[in-house]
Structure formats: C-alpha cells, structure tokens
Image (cartoon, rainbow, N blue to C red):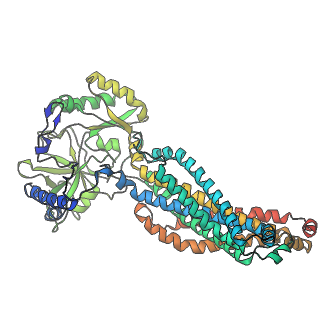
Amino acid sequence: MQPLVNGGCECGLLTSPDFQWWTLVGRLKPGVSKDLARADLDVLFQQTLRNRDLSRRSEQERHDLFTQHVELLPAARGTDNLRRELSSPLVLLMGMVILVLGVACANVANLLLARVSARHKEISVRLALGGSRRSVVQQLLVESATLALSGGVLGVLFAYWGGPVLLAMMSKGQNQLALNVHPDPLVLAFTLSISLATALGFGLAPALTAARTGMGASLQITSRTATAPRTARNFGRALVVAQLALSLVLALNAGLMARTLHYLETFNPGFTRQGVLLFGLAPTRIGYRGERLAQLYRELREVLSEIHGVRSVTFSRGMPISHRSSSEPITVEGYAPRPNENIEVYLNSVGPAFFETMQIPLLAGRDFSPEDNSGSPQVAIISEAMARRYFSGRSALGGRFAWGEGKARQVFEIVGIVGDAKYHSLREDPRPTAYLYALQGERLGDENFGVHASNPASLLPQIRSVMHTFDSRLVPWEPRTLEEQVDESLYQEKLVSKLSSFFGVLALLLAGLGLYGITAYMVARRTNEIGIRIALGADNNRILGMVLREALMLAAAGVVVGLPCAWASTRLIAALLYGLKATDPITLSGTVMLMAAVTFIAGYLPALRATKVDPIVALRYE
C-alpha cells in the first residue's frame, strides 16, 4: 500500500504507528466466501496486534484485544452510525405505531357494531326476501374494506407530508440527514396489506353479528324495544376496555420519555449551558507552530476579552459534549491498581480561564496561572471523581500522577480540584478527568475557543473581524452556542419524546372518542328508559351518575388491564430513560389522572345529553 496523498503531500498515515482509526472497505474475490475472508482477516488482525506496542495498556485490555474477532458487514449498510444510534428508538416508535393502529381499529370496529345494530331491520328484510347471510357478510366486509383503504390512502398522503418533518426531527442541528423517507412501492404494498388486514380483522365480527340476525324477531323491533344483542354489547365494551388499556401503555411510555428529556434539559451537567459561544480555530494548517502559535492564542484571548459584553475567553482541546477529549492510562503516586483495573482518565488540555468560562466550580487548590510555564514543573487540575477514586482518604493536592511511557513519560503535580463535568454525553456517569495546562509544554494545536458573554450569538461578526485583523486566513469554523451543542446532542431524545407524546395523545383521543361513542350509543338506545326515570322523578344528578358510572367502570377496567401491560412495556424502554425509573410514581399517577380526565369528558357529554331527554317525547317516540 502507498501512503495516502493529500494535496500533493504524502501524509504516510498508513505507515504511522500512532494512527489507529480506519474504515476499511473491500470486495470479495470471485469464489471466496465471507467466512473464509473473515478467517484470513482474523489471522492478519492478530499479527498486527503482536507487532504493536501495547505496553501502555493493562493486562485485561491486552487480553480483550487478542480475544476480539473481525466482523464483516455488508457495505450496502454504509459506514454511518445512524443505524446503530436510531435503531432502538425507531423500533420503540414502530411498536407505538402498532398500538395506535390497534386503538384506531378497535374504534372503527365499535362504530361498525353500532351501525350494524342500527341496520338490524334492514338486514332482516333482506334475509326475508331471499338474501343469503353470505351476501350480507360480503357487503359489510366490502364496506369496511372501503373504509380501511380510504384511511390507508389518506395515511400515505400524510406520510408524503410528514416524511420530511420526521427527517428534520432526526437531524442534528443544521446538518440534515441524507435519507429518502418518501414511501416506495414496497411501503405502499405494506400499507395496502395492513389496510386490508385491518378491514378483515375488525370488520368480520360486526359482519358475522349482523348475519346471525333473526328475521322474525328483528322485523318486530321498534325504537322502543331495539337493543343490540348482548354479545355485541359485551364485545363493544371489551373493545373500549382494550382501547383504554393500550392508551394507558402509550401515555405512560410517552410520559416517561418526556420526563427523561426534561431532566436532561434542566439538570446541572457540571458546566453552564447558557451564555457561551464556541468555535474552532485551525492555525496549524496555515503554518503556525511552537511559540508563534502560543503567542497567537494569548493575543487572541486578550483582544476577544475586550469586546463589549464578553466576560471571559478560553480555549481547549475538548469542550463539553464535544466528544473531543481523549482517554489515556495513567499511574498515580501512592495508588496500587487492582488486577486488570482500567486506570484510564479523560485528559483535556485547557487554556487560561477555562473553568471560569465554563463555570466549573473550583473546589480546592488553585487555578492555572501565568507562572505555570514551560520552565516550571508541570501541573494539573483534576476532577472530583478522579480525586475520589485515586485519593480516597487522603488529600489529592500535591499528589502526582504520570502519563506516557519511556522518554514520553510526563509527571504532573495536582494543584487544584474542580467539580465533575460531562464531555461525551449528558447520560454518562462522572468520569475521572485531568486538566493539563495548554500553555505549559508542547500541547497546543488546533483548539476550540469558548467566549462567555451576555449575548454570545451576536458576537460572531465581531469575532470574524478580529480574526481577519490578525490573519485573513483565520476563519472560525462550526460556530455555535454551547446551549445549541448540548441541544443537538439530545436530538434522539427529542425525536422519541415528541413522537411518543404525539402517539400517546392520539391514542388517548381515539380511546376517548371510542368511549364517547359507546356511551352516546347506550344513551340513544335507552332513551325510553331514561324518559321513564325522569317521569318517575329522577333528577339530573341521578341520570348523570347512572351514565357516568358505566363510563367510569369501563375506564377502571381499562386501567386494571393496562397497568400490567404498561409495567411490562416500560422494562423495554428502561435503557432509554435517564434520571428516573421505569416505575416512576409521578408519571404513573399523572397518566392515570389524565386518563380519568379523558374518561370524564367522554362520558359527561352523553350524560349531559341524557338529562335533557323530554319524557313525553321519549314515551311517544316510536
């Protein structure tokens, strides 16, 4: 292999022993199986490991490396991490879609049952005139299939509109994902199949109920005696209970995801989220090196600090939630590691006023100072987690730790302890972190600047002007506020929270409509009974209580059935939660109260209509 060529300069990355990260793409030779290629690559991988210097790694890490195997993945999947990042949330959302579909289908089945009940006399006449029960079932199935296919077509139209919206929700900040989310023939065929399956599944029961209608009894039905068959009434109530149970599952999961997002957006991650503008600078690419580079950073800090509204300015290799801090093994003076213990800590090279700008509290000792230069002993500031782990029971101030091997070994004296801050993810546990002073030693390179100001977003034009004054080739790249950077790291949580909340509200709305429909149907069928009750002296509160009681009993049954299902479902999303348990009592009680409110509204409207029944009209109606 020849070294990579970049802009006419041989970089030699393939032969560099320090470069570790590559994405390798290959094509199998004709006649070579995937298993044979994997076996050959495994041998090559083991040989490569034996030729590398792994002395800086622990025995357990070396063991883990030599027990790994090469895995060949189809190149058609691409090399992006999007599949790994979004597979679990999208599977969860697909499950929610299926549950919402079940709630909607149960609603439609209830409406079809009510419609069939109202058409008993029509169906009996057709049967009496020689129509077959099979033709009745076929007609009702065609009607339900037409209804389902119409819904499927409407859903496809919504999918064309909602696809770009979903893609925007999945994207990180201004970086839009290059995915084709428009329905293709396979998706259209799947939608058609699901529509037909729901038509058959939820239209068959009402059709069979209608086909079992007795001709003689049904022809004698009047408005006074008309009631749905007991089996149909019980089936309708069971559908409503199922709707409410599924809605409880969806609402509880949506509540847990919403509370997780709220917690991640509001808890203290160890640094300030507001008032900090971040941007990168790459002066090494235009020739800045050594003392010239250090002088550039010092002067830039001074000039940027003089801009009106700026409180402090710093630079560092890694900023919070930027994934740019490195993890390295260290040795701590006075600490004996356990066998196979992972002794890696995060190392971050930071400039002056880093902790002031990020508002990371100094708990003990001192901050870096101008006296910490290349001629003085190397110093470091460590996080509380590192002090707790390596200096338990003794003071960390004045302690020492070493990093590197051989001539590259460097020893640092600890001069300060700061609070824990998160650098890779808001979900990570506080990691042991050591901060090295960027202006001490040869640590400067392309750095990230942080400017703490009252209105950071408005400073970018002035910062660009300052850069141009120093060197017209200096251009800030990826400017954004720290708040935007943190928000972009939560894009997955926001996607799941928004969509699950939408599905939860939709399911509750559909369940409420189903409960309203069956309660209204019950009131309409019992108009004569209600008129008699009113004529015999029943007041409005009694009528309201009678109707609401049945609605609340259905809701209670839905809660009883739904709670075990909801508890089981929360165990599936436990890995997506943060800051609360899957059995969070606040979310559970809030979901039950929300369902009670929906139930009350859905039952109160038909109950209110029942209180307005005129007994004279009800008793005379035929």
Residue at 44%, 48% in the rendered image: 170
Along the horizontal axis of the image, is 408 left or right of 285?
A: left
Of all residues, the one furthest to the front in this rendering is: 130
Q: Please determine whether, in this image, residue 285 is positioned above or below residue 419.
A: above
Please provide percent x and percent y for residue 366. Answer: 25, 47
Along the horizontal axis of the image, is 25 left or right of 570?
A: left
Q: Please determine whether, in this image, residue 269 is positioned above or below residue 388.
A: above
Residue 533 visible in image = yes
- The quarter of the displayed image where residue 107 is located: bottom right
Residue at 43%, 57% in the rendered image: 89
Along the horizontal axis of the image, is 234 left or right of 46?
A: right
Residue 399 visible in image = no
Residue at 31%, 54% in the rendered image: 420
Quarter of the image that includes the C terminus = bottom right
Please provide percent x and percent y for residue 105. Answer: 61, 63
Q: Please determine whether, in this image, residue 611 is positioned above or below residue 557.
A: above
- The quarter of the displayed image where residue 230 is located: bottom right
Please provide percent x and percent y for residue 241. Answer: 63, 71
